[in-house]
Amino acid sequence: MARPRLQDVANHAGVSLATASRVLNGSSRQPGPELVERVRAAAADLGYVVNAQAQALARSRTGLLGLVVQDISDPYFSSIAAGAQAAAREHGRMVLLASTERDPDAERDAVAAFAAHRVDAIVVAGTRWSPEEDAPVATELEAFEAGGGRAVVVGQPLGPARVVRPPNAAGAADLAAALHEQGHRRFVLLSAPERVVTAQERAGAFTDAVAAGGGEVLEVIEQQFSRDGGYAAGDRVAEIAREAAAAGLDAPCVFAVTDVMAIGLIARLRDLDVAVPDDVRVAGFDDIPTLRDHVPSVTTVSIPLEEMGRLAVAAAVAEEGAEAGAVVGHEVVLRESTAR
Amino acid sequence: MARPRLQDVANHAGVSLATASRVLNGSSRQPGPELVERVRAAAADLGYVVNAQAQALARSRTGLLGLVVQDISDPYFSSIAAGAQAAAREHGRMVLLASTERDPDAERDAVAAFAAHRVDAIVVAGTRWSPEEDAPVATELEAFEAGGGRAVVVGQPLGPARVVRPPNAAGAADLAAALHEQGHRRFVLLSAPERVVTAQERAGAFTDAVAAGGGEVLEVIEQQFSRDGGYAAGDRVAEIAREAAAAGLDAPCVFAVTDVMAIGLIARLRDLDVAVPDDVRVAGFDDIPTLRDHVPSVTTVSIPLEEMGRLAVAAAVAEEGAEAGAVVGHEVVLRESTAR
DNA sequence: AGGTAGCCGGAATGCGCTTTCCGGTCCCAC
DNA sequence: GTGGGACCGGAAAGCGCATTCCGGCTACCT
C-alpha cells in the first residue's frame, strides 16, 4: 500500500487534481464549499499526507531554514537554537540543523549542504575566525544569496549575511566599568587564540575600558575557548594570586571571555585551594542558564541568547524590505565571584 | 541570473542530461573519463549546485532524518542531539530538528510535519507520557512506518518505533544499592507527576531496591520535571531535614529523579541554609555535563547521552535486517552530595 | 568471418505537486 | 434580451532530477 498521492485524492473525490490542490494546500483561490467538503473527506479517507518535497519543487520554496551552530551541546548554542526553533515554528518553517564542532570547514560544508537542499534562509551562529578561515563560508554564502537565499549570522559580519550582533564590546566595557566601580584595579585577562573573533572583541573592549579607568591588565592568558581552556589556565592564575598575596597586593580579578572558561577556571582553582573571590576574583560573559546555580555565583554579562536566535530567524524570514542588523541589549550582573 | 540546472550543465558540456546526472550524482554507472572531465568542468564553470529536493522527488528518498526533542536547551536533550547530529553526518544524512516544549501535541505535529517532508526516519527523544497523551503520536508514527519510514524512540516504547532505552530501572536500582552500601537508610523521593514515565521508572525501581535493602522511603514529593520543580521542593525537604535533626535521626537522603531537579533542590536548600550533605543528602540521575562543576559535586547515575543519540540514528539508518532495540550501560557515580 | 556479450550515450518517462491558462456558467446591468 | 464581468473547474505545462530503455559500437570468442 503506497502512500496516496494528491491525484488519488482527486479521483476519490471525483474532482480534478487542480481542485484538490487548491483545497488542501492553502491556495488563494478556494473552490466551492461542496467540493471543498468532498476533497477534505477524500483526503481524510485515504490518509493523505502532502509531499513537501514535491511542493517545494513546484513552488521553488521549501519552507526550510538552515541553522548552523558550532556545538549544539554547548549551552550558548543550544539556547540560541531554542530561540531560533521557537521562532521558526511560529513562522511555519522547519529547521535543518548542523553542528560543526567548531570547524570552519564543516561550517562551509553545512552551508553547501543547506544550499543543495534549497533552504529559504541560512542562519550561522557562532564566532567568526580569521579572514582566511572565514573566506570559504563567506563565498558559499555569497553563492547562496546569489541564488535567491538569505543569510543571517549571529556573531560578526560574514560575507553578505545580515548580522545579529552580541553586545561583546559594549558588554565587556560595561563589565570593566562595573568592576572598577567595585574597586577592582588589577586584572588578568583569560582569552582565547587570536582567531576567535568573539574573544578578541570582548578582550579588546575590556582592556581599553580598564585602561581608561586607570586600572591595569597584569597578564593575558591565552587558552582554548572552552571549559577545558579555563581549567588549564587555573595553575597560572593560582600563581598570580599567590604572588599578589605574598606582595600584599589586592587579589587580582580575572576576566574570562566566556562563562564556560570562567567555570573551568574556578573548578581548577578549587582543586588548588585557591578561594574565589577571596584569593582571586573571576568574571565571565554570556550568563548561560547553568550559571544560575553555580557556587560561587559568578559575575557576568547577561546577553539574551534565546532572543538572539529569534531575531536571527526574524531577519531570515523577513520580507525583502526589512532592516539589516539587529542590536540586542545586555546587562552586567555582579555576583559573589567578584565580591570584595 | 537563475541557478543553473543540470540541463544547463549538460548543454554546456555538450552531453545529455542523463550523462551529466551520472557523472555528478554518484550513479553506479560512470561514463567515459573524457566525458566525466567535461561535465565536471562545466559544473564548476556554472557554479552548479544540485537540487536535493528534485533529487529526493526523483529518487523518492530524501536523506533527511527527523529529530524530535522535548527541549533543545536542556542539556539532556542537547547532548542526545549532539550525538545524533554527529552520527547523522557520518551517515550522510541531514537532521531536521523539532523542539516541542514538552507538549505531546507539539510532538505529534512535529512527527506529522516530518512525515510531510518525507524524512527517511524519525527519532523521538524524551520521556513518554500517559497512554492517552501518547496515542496521537503513536498513530502518527504508525502511519509514518506504513508509508515506508522508520521510527526510533529514545525513552520508552511508542507505537511501532524501535527503542533505545535509557537504563532507568537498572540505574536507579544500582544507585539505591550504592547508597545503601554507604549506609543510607532513610530516603525521600523527589519525583514528577505520574504521567512522566521516565520519572516513574526511576522512582519505582529506586523504591523497590530501597525496600529490598531494608531501607525506608519517608515521603514522596511530586514536582515538575525540571530545575524549578526541584527548587520548589526545597522547603519541604528542609522541613524533613529539620525534623530528622530534631529527632536525632540520620540525615535523610533525597533521590531526585533527574539531575536538574537535584540542582534546583540544592539551590533552594542553600537559600534556606540547609547544608548538603551534612543536613540532607542529595542524589540525581543522568550525569549531565554541567554537573561536573557543581558545588557540592552531586552523586548521580551516569548514562551515555551522546551515545544514545548515536544509537538512535544508527537504528534509524540501519538496513532492514538490523536489530530492534539497543541497550546502553550506566554507572553510579558517588560524589560529595551523599557523603556521610 | 560471423556472432554475441558487454558498454556507452541519449531520448524519454515519471517522481508529486503548483499554477497558468482556457472554456464554460451564472448573474447582473443596461 | 443581450453583452460583459466574475467566478469556477479542469487540462496541461512545467519544477529539476533519476533512471529505464534503446540503438549503436567495440571487442572478443568460435
Image (spheres, coloured by chain):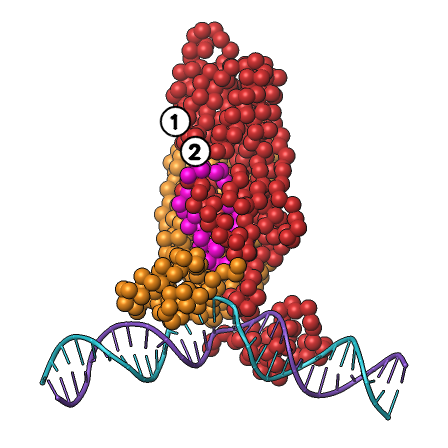
Chain colours: A red, B orange, C purple, D cyan
Give the numbered dot on residue A232.
1
Kindly tell me whether residue A201 is visible in this rendering.
Answer: yes
Task: Point out the image quarter for the C terminus of chain A.
Answer: top right
With respect to residue B92, does A22 lie above or below? below
x%, y% of residue B34? 28, 64
Q: Chain of mark 2?
A: A
Q: A176 or A337, which is in the foreground? A: A176
B218 horizontally vs B26: left or right: right
Residue A195 circle label: 2
**Magenta residues, start to end:** A104-132
Q: Label 1, label 2: how many angstroms apart (C-alpha)?
A: 19 Å
Q: Amino acid at mark 2?
A: Arg
Tell which subunit mark 1 falls on.
Answer: A
**In front here: B66 or A272?**
B66
Q: Nearer the viewer, mark 1 or mark 2?
A: 2
Q: State the residue at coordinates (43%, 33%).
A: A195
Residue B228: image x %, image y %? 59, 39
Q: Residues within 10 Å of mark 1 (few under 14, many from 20)?
A: some
Instruction: Provide the secondary structure element on which disc 1 rests.
Output: helix
Residue B338 locus on image (x, y percent): 45, 32
Taking the spot 40% from the left edge, 67% from the top edge, the residue there is: B10
